[in-house]
Amino acid sequence: GESVGLHLPTLSVQEGDNSIINCAYSNSASDYFIWYKQESGKGPQFIIDIRSNMDKRQGQRVTVLLNKTVKHLSLQIAATQPGDSAVYFCAEASGYSTLTFGKGTMLLVSP
Amino acid sequence: SQTIHQWPATLVQPVGSPLSLECTVEGTSNPNLYWYRQAAGRGLQLLFYSVGIGQISSEVPQNLSASRPQDRQFILSSKKLLLSDSGFYLCAWSASGTGGYEQYFGPGTRLTVT
């Protein structure tokens, strides 16, 4: 079946740097994308979402970019902080409200 | 505001023993409910989802089952656990109806089968 995947399993950055986490998807029918943050031993936490009729959406310190031409999704975190260290998952959905999750990227922020 | 609860937080069970994990949601009505399993260092695997009382859809054939006896209660069960059932079990909810893909997750249950 079609799936969502991530390019980088681990990303290490310095505190204050900007982080970019990438995600590729293969289902061209997907109309909704979402990013989650999961800290160790906890459930995933919603960060930001975007619908397929948009290219960019901004939140507090985070921006999601959607490139439908190449089926690519990215999460940008500005001024990364140690508290941002976690695993980040992208997920896609179409039709019913079931999400298909990618494998995840570990973000490590050094002080 | 809506909250989601799971218990127990951690569980150690021997192979062949039964399992019952419970999830409850507060502050919303008729939610869609989901059970996921996450192996160590891996992504989330959808096990079951429910759009209403008594309505269960299974995504992966296995020795687990799910039930929804009440609107905001979702239970994950097994009659006989296998070693491969070890993992982090997450319950989630989303708003019913159209346009609401966003899911909200509970704190999870760490299950170790020995």
Image: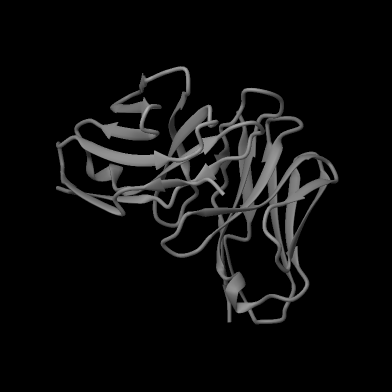
Q: Quadrant of residue B88?
A: bottom right
Q: Is residue B49 left or right of residue A58?
A: right
Q: Is residue B31 left or right of residue B44?
A: right
For the image, the number of numbered tags is 0
Question: Which color mode does the image show?
Answer: one colour
Q: Residue A49: horizontal and vertical position, in percent?
A: 45, 28
Looking at the picture, does residue B95 appear above or below residue B40? Answer: above
Residue at image location 47% in from the left, 17% down from the top: A53
Q: Quadrant of residue B16?
A: bottom right
Looking at the picture, does residue A7 appear above or below residue A76? Answer: below
Of residues A47 and B43, the one nearer the viewer is B43
Q: Is residue A105 left or right of residue B80?
A: left
Residue at image location 78% in from the left, 72% down from the top: B79
Of residues A77 and A15, the one nearer the viewer is A77
Q: Residue A43: horizontal and vertical position, in percent?
A: 50, 49
Of residues B22 and A1, the one nearer the viewer is A1
Residue at image location 54% in from the left, 44% down from the top: A100
Q: Residue B105: horizontal and vertical position, in percent?
A: 56, 43
Q: Residue A96: horizontal and vertical position, in percent?
A: 67, 33
